[in-house]
Amino acid sequence: AAPSSRPEIAGLDWQQLQESVAGCRACGLCASRKQTVFGVGNEQAHWMIVGEAPGEQEDQQGEPFVGTAGQLLDSMLRAIGLTRSEAPPEKQVFIANTLKCRPPRNRNPEPEELAACQPYLERQLQLIKPRIILALGRFAVQSLLGSNEAIGRLRGKVHSYQGIPVIVSYHPAYLLRNLSDKARAWEDLCLAMSTLQAQAAR
Ligand code: URA
């Protein structure tokens, strides 16, 4: 049976939150993970990118999006002047996932795993206070917007998570299999940039 302890995370600071994630046993994924994957980037980032869950590479390296999908994501970010590496806040992205642990064989996250992990993502968002959020794929969309609609129907508009603009786009792993949608993903990234710039100009 899945361990059922619920971490009390609402008041944690950044370091406490990292420690809490590292030691989390709130769902069954703690039994099969090599390590947790908290996220990458720094707390001052203006951009927050939310993916699905760590895969094999991420589980091994402890960093999100370091496999093939991550290379695609990085190259798209680079093309618009953004990076996960140390950078001024307006160029800095913080990348996190809805799940901090790898599901076995990269299966889809289960609802109870998403529910158990959601408070970590929420606290990350509260502490970072990003100016724009990019939700990649349906699990990120479910977590942030509570919507089960298809990405194709949600993309192209500006949504909101607690007052922060959210742009919905395709998951990079999907893009690797559906190259024809890459141009749309690029449009989404440009929409995120123009939304952020419009907000900064106000
Ligand atoms: N896919 C994701 O959604 N997140 C990762 O960190 C890697 C692949």
Image (cartoon, rainbow, N blue to C red):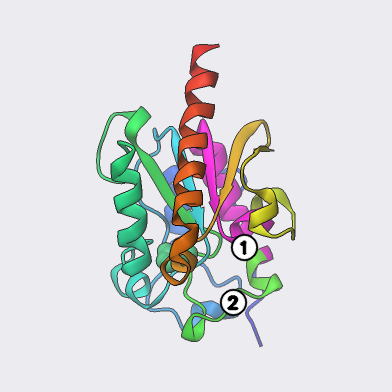
Q: Residue at x 68, y 35 (%)?
A: 162
| 161 to 26, vertically: above or below | above
Q: Report crowding for label 1: few under 14, some 14 to 19, many 20 or more residues within 10 A (C-alpha).
A: many
Residue 108 - label: 2
Question: Is 135 within the magenta?
Answer: yes
Which residue matches tag 1? 139
Between 99 and 18, the one lying in front of the other is: 99
Give the residue type at disc 2: Asn
The residue segment tinted magenta is: 115-143
Give the residue type at disc 1: Phe
Circle nearer the N terminus (1, 2): 2
Total number of numbered labels? 2
Q: In which quarter of the image is ligand 1?
A: bottom left
Q: Is residue 83 visible in the rendered structure shown here?
A: no
Q: Report crowding for label 2: few under 14, some 14 to 19, many 20 or more residues within 10 A (C-alpha).
A: few
What secondary structure is marked by label 2? loop
Q: Where is residue 68 in the image (x, y as percent from the top left)?
A: 32, 68
Query: Ligand 1: does it lie within 8 Å of the C-beta at label 1?
Result: yes
Question: Is 31 within the magenta?
Answer: no
Q: Where is residue 111 in the image (x, y as percent from the top left)?
A: 70, 71
Residue 180 - label: none
Q: Determine the main secondary structure of the stretch shown in magenta.
A: helix
Between 10 and 116, the one lying in front of the other is: 116
Q: Are marks 1 and 2 in contact (CB under 8 Å)?
A: yes
